[in-house]
Image: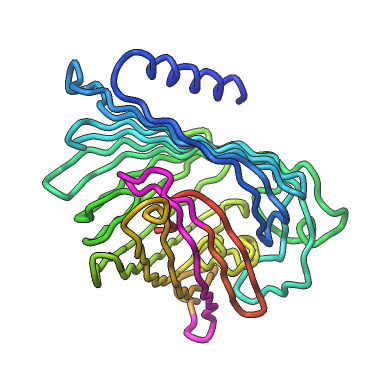
Amino acid sequence: MKKMIMIWGMWLAVWGFLCGDTVLTGYPFIAYSSDTGVMGGAFAIWQKDQGTPVAKVYPRKVSLLSNVLYSQKHQFAVFLIPEYSATNEDWKYSSDLYLADWPDDYYGTGNETNKDNVESYTARVFRIENSYSHRIYRDLTGSITSNTGYHHLKKTVPNGYLEADPLLGKDQSVFSGIGVGLLLDTTDSNNYPTRGIKYSVNYTAFRSELGSDYDYDMFRYDLRHYLPLTNKVVFATQSDLVINEGDVPFYNYMELGNRLRAYNSKRYVEKVRVAQRFEQRVTPFEEGFLERTGFVLFGELGQVSPTVDKIRLTDWHWSTGFGFRYAILTEDRLNLRMDFGFGEGAFNFIINAREVF
């Protein structure tokens, strides 16, 4: 895996010296979240405009987003997200590589876990997701995706909750799936939309014929709407539903904390997740250093469930809070974000790159 990362980075570096305009920027950071404790790391973005490509199959724009993390709990993770696209966005290839040695928390599964009944475990994880998309007509794009990974529980509490629960995925295993998707995108920006909608539906099949140790299906629905209230204020919403059916390993259960920022990501996990989020984004300044800064207010609702028919109106969890933004790249408005989330007896502080939706 380390060799793969080195080869990938060397290939992009060589490309960077060949032609076109290159932008490279990065920032070290120190942060805290309930998942990790104190965390340090570095974030970097590399972008290249190739100019006029030799042929249509060659990418004009190439970028690499990277993030390296190390936490107080001795958690280590590397994120690499390369992307290649044509001049007119008729086609795009992107990849998301994640490598981690990650001590984590287990609260059990379901919508009513107790925050005091928690135990630690350590997992070694490798995952790579690839997506090739092609424009079908105007704002409608079709995609083919692959999702492959490896999971190994290095350390658990002897005779603890995790060992006792009858869950799939506690043994060393591989998951592998292929999927298709449709995306209707009328927004004006990939990193910081100010108007339009982004509506996507995806289906992924994980099968033993593809090398997976588990056979299951994943359906995903995601609707995002961006409404400009003024030239400095944007109201954004996201409706999200993910359904997993079949022999789903517990490490691929949906995490409500990935939608509700007040909670540890593992606090509520299950095969099905539904969430609704609202966010008001403000970029009030126009000149100098402050032009890069922005602010957000957000509110979020969601729940998890073993099946869709067991979703209940009384089981919603909520999260609300505020955040600060700093544009690492001003032209594309690629933001470094800092969010403070408050929930039902919960608080979380998160720092990361890009908007949450």
Q: Nearer the viewer, residue 320 or 269?
A: 320
- At which x and y percent is residue 261? 55, 66
| Residue name at image x 27 percent, y 38 percent | 133
Image side of residue 213 versus residue 178, left or right: right
Residue bounds of the magenta highlight: 312-337
Does the magenta portion include 315?
A: yes
Q: Farthest bottom residue? A: 314
Q: Is 308 situated left or right of 76 in this image?
A: left
Q: Position of residue 206 (x, y in %)?
A: 47, 44
Which residue is found at the position 52% from the left and 68% from the top?
260
To which quarter of the image does residue 317 belong?
bottom right
Residue 26 left/right relative to 89: right
Give how far across and how far down residue 357 sits, in percent.
39, 58
Which is nearer the eye, 80 or 199?
Answer: 80
Q: Residue at x 87, y 57 (%)?
A: 159
Assess whether residue 303 is covered by the magenta stretch. no
Q: Residue at x 83, y 59 (%)?
A: 160
Q: Is residue 288 left or right of residue 1?
A: left
Decide if residue 171 is in sight here: no
Nearest to the observer: residue 18 or residue 76: 18
| Magenta region, main secondary structure | strand
